[in-house]
Amino acid sequence: MSEKNRDRKRTARERLAVEREKQKAAERRRRTLIVAASVVGVLGLAAIIGVVAANAGKDDGGDSAGPVVAPSGAQGKDALAIPVGKESARSTLTVWEDFRCPACKSFEDTYRSTIHELTDAGKLKVEYHLASIIDGNMGGSGSRTAANAAACAQDVGKFPAYHDVLYENQPQETDDAFADDDKLFELAGKVDGLVTPAFRTCVEEGTHDSWVEKSNQAFTGGGFTGTPTVLFNGKNIYQDQTMTPAKLKKMVEEADQG
């Protein structure tokens, strides 16, 4: 074979080798691009799913909370107070309570008859604010569901009687019995005319749940130390160790005389 032929064959082999390397390099780039595109696609899909999930979570949260529906006749800022007594009364007792709170039951048992006497006489107006701090402290939902049921009773003018029945039959603090609608209906049966289809629907659907939650937020944001918190014409009297039903009655009567 002539030298010229060998040179041509060598040159051809070299060109072929170079072309093969080019093809291999192109194939590597193609594979790299495919992998990169796949990663970007997965990350993009994950991001989209994350956004959708986040938005779905926000929507669910809003829907589950439901609208804030104040009970009939509720008064005060954001309609968070349930009034008992005559508007013309010269004295106002503001009471923050939780239906699962043992100290609230103690207050009610001690002052109930005096408060009834003064409200019936038109000398005292009571503004009840319902909280649900025991649910947060002990777990469960009985504070909220009982408060909702009490608000449902307010809708039909039966709040004072049902309020008293709930405290008179309060379970142990660790017993979340008020979370059971059937228990709330059983106790409602002690109040003449309360158990109606409208009341049952209101309790079962938690019509005032969001209102109770808003009331509880107002309590926790109000700088109060615990339930019950009892204010007489704006002054905290529950912290007064000398306070008694007789002393409260005297304060109300003195204010009524002007």
Image: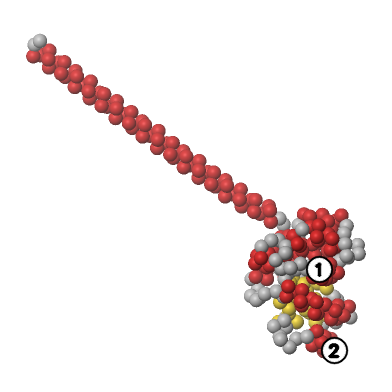
Q: Quadrant of residue 102?
A: bottom right
Percent position of residue 76, x then y: 75, 71
Q: Which residue is mark 1?
A: 169
Total marks drawn? 2
Q: Residue at x 68, y 53 (%)?
A: 64
Q: Earlier in the sequence, mark 2 or mark 1?
A: 1
Q: Is residue 122 visible?
A: no
Say above or below: 248 vs 95: below
Say above or below: 20 vs 80: above
Percent position of residue 170, x then y: 78, 68
Q: Residue at x 29, y 30 (%)?
A: 25
> What is the crowding at mark 2: few (fewer than 14 residues within 10 Å), some, or many (at least 20)?
few
Specify the amino acid type for callout 2.
Answer: Gln
Q: Which residue is mark 2?
A: 257
Specify the amino acid type for callout 1.
Answer: Asn
> What is the crowding at mark 1: few (fewer than 14 residues within 10 Å), some, or many (at least 20)?
few
- Which residue is at the front of the view, 31 or 164? 164
Percent position of residue 48, x then y: 53, 43
